[in-house]
Image (cartoon, rainbow, N blue to C red):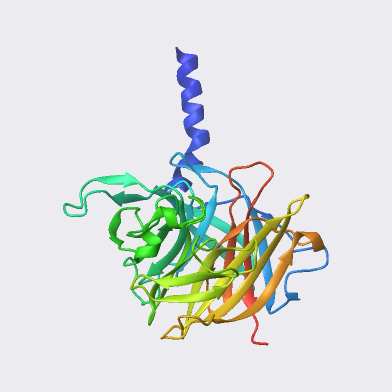
Amino acid sequence: MRKVIEIVLLLCVLLAPWQRNSAAETLLETKPVPLSGELNVGDRIGHIRFLGMLELPNPSIAGIRLSQLSGLTWDEDDGILYAISDKGFLFHLRPVIEKDVLTGLKLLKAVPLGALVNKSTKIRQERILDSEGLDIFHGHNGRKGDAELIVSVERTPRIVRFRPDGKSISEYLLPAPFRNTKNYRNSNKMLESVCVDAKLGILSVTETPLKSERAGYTRIFNIEGKTWFYPLAEGNRVTALECLGKNKVMVLESNFTGTFGRLLVMLKTATLPTDPSATEPVSVENLMTLDTATGHHIDNFEGLTRHRGNRFFVISDDNDLFIQRTLLMYFEVLAE
């Protein structure tokens, strides 16, 4: 019996540092990853400057595994990088930036996302699954602790508002074409992204065009029902939106194709007129194209957020597969 007690005490001593860190901040054991063999930190590709990329481990905190990350948003007031997973978990992270380069990442907290079942009583909650897009309200107003998060969901198309503790506040009514699951190509091609524009409101876009969409286009829409035609090449899918202000959005696209699994990732900006045309597409500028066929070390990038100024993060969804990685990349968009 004495031997058992000694072993238990020893385990408590060994686990104490992890227990303290799990309640505060845990510096993850990340691995730096070059963008390619020819591109170093600080180098330019297209209209961006590469400022570091990290491969993240998959630790668990409070029984929640850090994996399948598909959405990002930055809270400037509290210095937190929020990330959501396909399995309906919200992670509080803190990037380590040294001399403008991403060098590390801290894990602060992980909580499940719960959506309201009974909107009138606002009591009962259910787990949100297949959460994909993420953005923030009140993250840049100079006040700590008042942030609210906007999450878009696949399987059952929804846009839900949350507190950072994972409790839901409200759910938005989607415009008619986007409420009906039968209008989508399949249950995994729904609302992959969401962002908030001061003038245009809450914006989202289907990952692939609706069944009724004309060839070569998808539609960005706001919850009031305005829609903008966005040109989308055959095989491409929209994985993230980031509202930039002044009616501009940044769009992350990807294309996974070919016998050997070639992956292309494209970063673009689009200008959305206040009064959208019923027939004309929006103007689009390509900022960069990354291609595994030309040696770029990329993965399934699905999350995008602005950090500060013209600097941004993107993150990849590892799909809980050992052959994929969770990569967090930091970059700057150049003026010319």
- Which of the 4 image quarters holds residue 33? bottom right
- Which of the 4 image quarters holds residue 294? bottom right
Q: Quadrant of the N terminus?
A: top left
Which is nearer the eye, 76 or 89? 89
User: On the picture, is 277 further left or further right than 270?
Assistant: left
Image location of residue 208, percent across then percent down: 54, 61
The residue under the point 67% across, 62% down is 53
Q: Tell which residue pokes out farthest to the right in this image.
A: 38
The residue under the point 68% across, 87% down is 336
- Asked if 200 appears above or below 169 in the picture, the reply is below
The residue under the point 44% across, 57% down is 183
Which is nearer the eye, 270 or 176? 176
**Residue 100 visible to the viewer:** no
- Tell how many labels: 0
Image location of residue 38, percent across then percent down: 83, 67
**Residue 145 visible to the viewer:** yes
Which is nearer the eye, 317 or 236? 236
The residue under the point 66% across, 41% down is 322
Q: Tell which residue pokes out farthest to the top in this image.
A: 1
Q: Tell which residue pokes out farthest to the left in this image.
A: 121
Which is nearer the eye, 31 or 286? 286
Image location of residue 119, percent across then percent down: 21, 54
- Asked if 175 appears above or below 30 in the picture, the reply is below
Image location of residue 285, percent across then percent down: 63, 81
